[in-house]
Amino acid sequence: MRFAMSAEALWAGNFRDLSASVTRMATLADSGRITDAIVSDETARLKKLWHHYARTAEQNDVDLEDLMSESDFQELDLFDAMQLQAVIGVCRRSRSISDAGRKLFAASRSAKAKPNDADRLKKYLAKFGLSWDGLA
C-alpha cells in the first residue's frame, strides 16, 4: 500500500496495471498467499515499467506560470497548457529555433513547398505571448 500511494507509483495504465499486477502476484503465490518477496518483485517490475514515463514527465516539467503573465495563464485551457508544456520542453532541449521546429513539425513539413519551421514555431509561441529567447 505504501508503494501504491507513493509518488513512485505512476499508475500510467490505471486499472490495467493494477489488475495485471494483482493477477501476476496471485499466479505466483504459493498456496494462495502473496508473500513480501512476491510484492517486492512486482514493485520492482512496476518501477522498471514506469521508468520511461517518469523520465518523460521530468523532461516536460515546465512551469507555465513562470513564463506567462497571470492573466494569460488563467485563460489557458488544459489542452493548450499541456501542448504548450510539451512544445517548450522540446524547445529547451534543442540547439536553435530551427532545430526545435524541425523536431516539432517533422511530419507536416514534408507537405509544404517551402517549410519554414522556425517561423511556424515563432508564430505558435507568439500566440501565447512567448518568444524563443524568453524560454531559456
Image (spheres, rainbow, N blue to C red):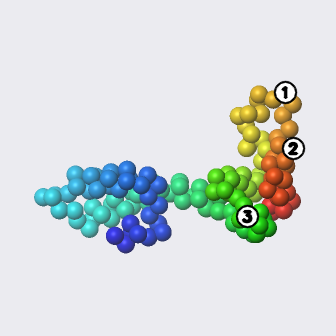
Name above or below for residue 75 compared with residue 95.
below
Residue at x 37% of width, y 62% of height: 43
Residue 17 drawn at (x, y percent): 38, 53
Classify mark 3: residues with Cα within 10 Å, few (<14), some (14-19) or many (20+).
some
First in residue order: circle 1 vs circle 3: 3
Q: Amino acid at mark 1?
A: Ala
- For residue 37, what is the image quadrant? bottom left
First in residue order: circle 3 vs circle 2: 3
Residue on which the image places disc 1: 113
Classify mark 1: residues with Cα within 10 Å, few (<14), some (14-19) or many (20+).
few
Quadrant of the snapshot with the C terminus: bottom right
Q: Secondary structure at mark 3?
A: helix
Q: Secondary structure at mark 1?
A: loop
Q: Amino acid at mark 2?
A: Asp
The Cα atoms of the two marked residues, 2 and 1, are separated by: 14 Å
Classify mark 2: residues with Cα within 10 Å, few (<14), some (14-19) or many (20+).
few
The Cα atoms of the two marked residues, 3 and 2, are separated by: 23 Å
Q: Residue furthest left?
A: 31
The Cα atoms of the two marked residues, 1 and 3, are separated by: 35 Å
Residue on which the image places disc 3: 73
Residue at x 33% of width, y 51% of height: 20
Name above or below for residue 102 compared with residue 96.
above
Residue 52 drawn at (x, y percent): 53, 54
Name above or below for residue 71 compared with residue 102.
below
Residue at x 86% of width, y 59% of height: 133
Residue 4 drawn at (x, y percent): 38, 66
